[in-house]
Amino acid sequence: MVVDYGKGQYIVRIAGVAAPLEGPLAAGATEFVSKLVLGKEIRARFVGRNKNGEMVARVFVGDPGSDVGLELVRNGLARRQAVSEPELGYKYGELAKAEVEAREAKRGLWATAQPQ
C-alpha cells in the first residue's frame, strides 16, 4: 500500500500477510484495503525491510486501531506468511487464528475446496 504522510509517500508491505497478486481476489484485497484506510489516519509499526528493500510494517486504522493485515486474513483475502520472525506472525498467533476462522467460514481464498 502507498502511505502519504503529507510531505511524501512510503510504499509499505503489510507485515505477516501474502495477498494474491492478480485475479479477482487480488482486486478484492485491494478494494478491501482501500475502503478500510483511504482518507483515514493510519499508524504503521515499522518491522523492517524485506529482501527487496520494501518497508514492512503492521498497519492500523482507527482508534484503538483495526489491524489491516489481520482483517485481510480474517476475511480470506490474504494468507498469513509462514515466517520465523515472531513479530511478523504477531505475538499471540492472531494471524493463525484469523486464517483458521476464514478457512472454517470458507471466505475468500478458502471459498473453494482448493485454495487459490
Image (cartoon, rainbow, N blue to C red):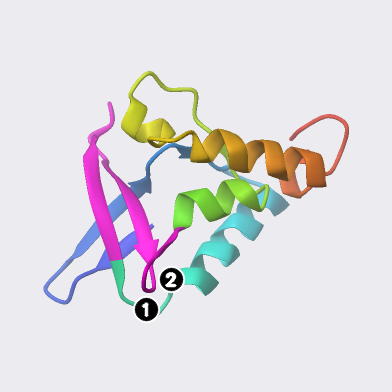
Q: Amino acid at mark 1?
A: Lys
**Is 81 covered by the magenta stretch?**
no
Residue furthest to the right in view is 113
Q: Which residue is mark 1?
A: 40
- Please tell me whether mark 1 sits on a helix, a strand or a loop: loop
Q: Nearer the viewer, residue 33 or 94?
A: 94
Percent of width and height locating residue 62:
39, 73
Q: Amino acid at mark 2?
A: Val
Residue 5's image quarter? bottom left
Residue 47's image quarter? top left
Q: Nearer the viewer, residue 95 or 32?
A: 95
Residue drawn at x 55%, y 60% is 30
Residue 78's image quarter? top right
Asked whether the beta carbons under mark 2 and mark 1 sit within 8 Å of each other, the answer is yes
Reply above or below: 115 against 71: above
Percent of width and height locating residue 110:
77, 39
Instruction: Give the left or right position of residue 39, taking residue 17 as reference.
Output: left
Residue drawn at x 35%, y 56% is 59
Percent of width and height locating residue 113:
88, 32
Residue furthest to the bottom in view is 39
Q: Residues within 10 Å of mark 1 (few under 14, many from 20)?
A: few
Q: Which mark is residue 37?
A: 2
Residue furthest to the top in view is 84
Quarter in which the C terminus is drawn:
top right
- Please tell me whether mark 2 sits on a helix, a strand or a loop: helix
Instruction: Give the left or right position of residue 104, taking residue 50 as reference.
Output: right
Which residues, given as a range, are shown in magenta?
A: 43-67
Q: Residues within 10 Å of mark 2 (few under 14, many from 20)?
A: some
What is the chief secondary structure element of the magenta stretch? strand
